[in-house]
Amino acid sequence: MEKRQLSKNGPMVPVLGFGAWPIGGGMGNVDEKTAIATVQAAIEGGITLIDTAQYYRTSEEIVGKAIKGRRDNVFLATKVSFDYSKQGIMKAMEDSLRKLQVDYVDLYQIHGWNPKYPIAESMEAMEELRRSGKTRYIGVSNFDVDQMKEAQKTAPFHSLQPRYNVFDREIEKDILPFCERGVIGILAHSPLAKGLLTGKYTPDYKFPEDDERSRFPRFQGEEFGRYLAKADKLKAVARARNLTLVQLAIGWQLRLSTVTCVLVGAKNPEQVKEHVGAAGWKLTDGELKQIEDILEGRR
């Protein structure tokens, strides 16, 4: 598995990471045995960066069971998701370490910006955890440029975790250039747009109630159909290269050296095998133009 450096003085990490939100049940139930097997298949396939969070339901407990005896082979990342006060961050870390059954994590992240909690206090707590050895590196998630600048006033951080995929490209204007200039690692989440880029669905598909997508507008009605129509055209580009749509969508992100790692969720080992095939190749200029033409409605 190809590796890239996470920030200027950070570690080398695989270009594919395991996003552990789905195995916690947020996108439909996944039985524990299958969830554990999925994490272990990722590790065996070279996807050794595993990203979870306090918010991800049972995900941390599952990851903890899956990596037992394999800790030294894993770059383990998690996030504090709710209370960003110093006390809240410290307690969340202890809870995460207990659930993950480890003494430290490799990367600890603030899950989102919340003006209720002064960012200086939050970053002081994160830096204290780093100095104490509870985490090796610190990061933020879903921050914009101004929020990152504010956080940097208190403590330097190593990574940002933003949403990024062919349908959600907001970070390209300001966030990617800022991170490139500051050598801040990018862990891109939602690379498959929560399933829109899997090629699995038809416009009449109804998501079960225990799947978060059943409540999202882009997975309903005409809007759902429009996304799937573009995905179907992208699938043709993938087929011409002997790739799946999933592999094309992930490889499209890896075209950018600024993207350190693409976090891909999976519900079973078969999906992991497909993800592994997304690394180790590059899109041509012609293929990139075809993709842009499809996204812009020119094809």
Image: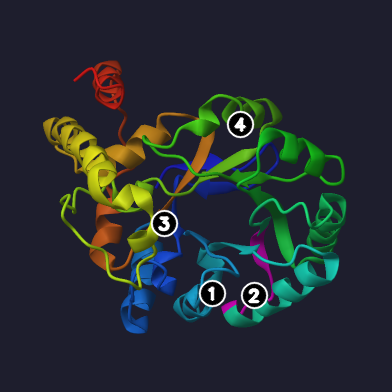
Magenta residue span: 100-108
Q: Do the CB atoms of the residues marked 1 and 3 lie less than 8 Å apart?
A: no
Select label 4 or label 2 by which is in front: 4
Question: Tag 4, which secondary structure?
Answer: helix
Residue 93: x %, y % from top left: 71, 72
- Placement of 284 over or under 219, stated as above or below: above
Q: Do the CB atoms of the residues marked 1 and 2 lie less than 8 Å apart?
A: yes
Q: Earlier in the sequence, mark 1 or mark 2?
A: 1
Question: Tag 1, which secondary structure?
Answer: helix
What residue does disc 4 label? Answer: 175
What residue does disc 1 label? Answer: 60
- Crowd tier of the residue under label 3, counting other residues whose Cα lies within 10 Å: few below 14, some 14–19, many 20 or above: many
What residue does disc 2 label? Answer: 96
Q: Earlier in the sequence, mark 3 or mark 4?
A: 3
Q: Does the segment drawn in magenta span residue 105? A: yes
Q: Disc 4 residue type?
A: Ile
Q: Distance between the residues labelled 1 and 4?
A: 29 Å
- Placement of 90 over or under 205, stated as above or below: below
Is residue 69 visible to us here?
Answer: no
